[in-house]
Image (cartoon, rainbow, N blue to C red):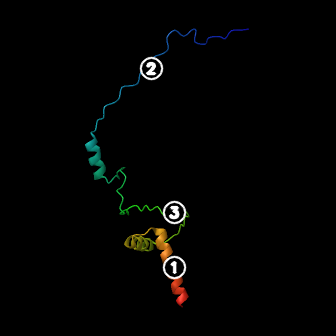
Amino acid sequence: MSTRVNSFATLNDPPVFTPKPKADRAVQKETIARIADDNNFPSRQAPKPSATRRKPRRYRTGRNAHLGIKATAETVERFYKAADERNVPSGELLRLALDALERVRESL
């Protein structure tokens, strides 16, 4: 059986690499910020959210079927306002609305 050749046998000491020294910044951060403001450069900071958020609604009702619908912002706001006024979950408000629609339809 032959032996493997050691490719590092002739290497006495591994080379030493050192990082280059960091260059000093010639301009201060405040100066950079002032120049950016003077020239209308946008900030990389995330914009603050403009819309107000609703309080999360968590009800344990046993309903497990999802109904995803598209509606205008005004309709969604009216729907959640009606649910909040009656203090019922969204699914219950939908059931009440459908019951009322069927009663109106039967009376015609």
Camera-nearest label, 2 or 3? 3
Q: Residue at x 50, y 74 (%)?
A: 95
Q: Nearer the viewer, mark 2 or mark 1?
A: 1
Q: Secondary structure at mark 3?
A: loop
- The foreground one among 18 and 50 is 50
Q: Residue 94 location, x and y as percent?
A: 49, 73
Q: Where is mark 3, residue-wise?
A: 62
Q: Which residue is mark 1?
A: 99
Q: Amino acid at mark 2?
A: Phe
Q: Check disc 3 and give the amino acid type.
A: Gly
Vertical side of 17 occupied by 102: above or below: below
Judge by depth and name the residue closer to the eye, 38 or 91: 91
Q: Is residue 62 above or below residue 37?
A: below
Q: Nearer the viewer, residue 67 or 104?
A: 104
- How far apart marks 2 and 3 lie (CA) works out to 66 Å
| Circle 1: element type | helix
Q: Residue at x 44, y 20 (%)?
A: 17
Residue 51: image quadrant is: bottom left
Q: Secondary structure at mark 2?
A: loop
Q: Upstream in the sequence, badge 2 or badge 3?
A: 2
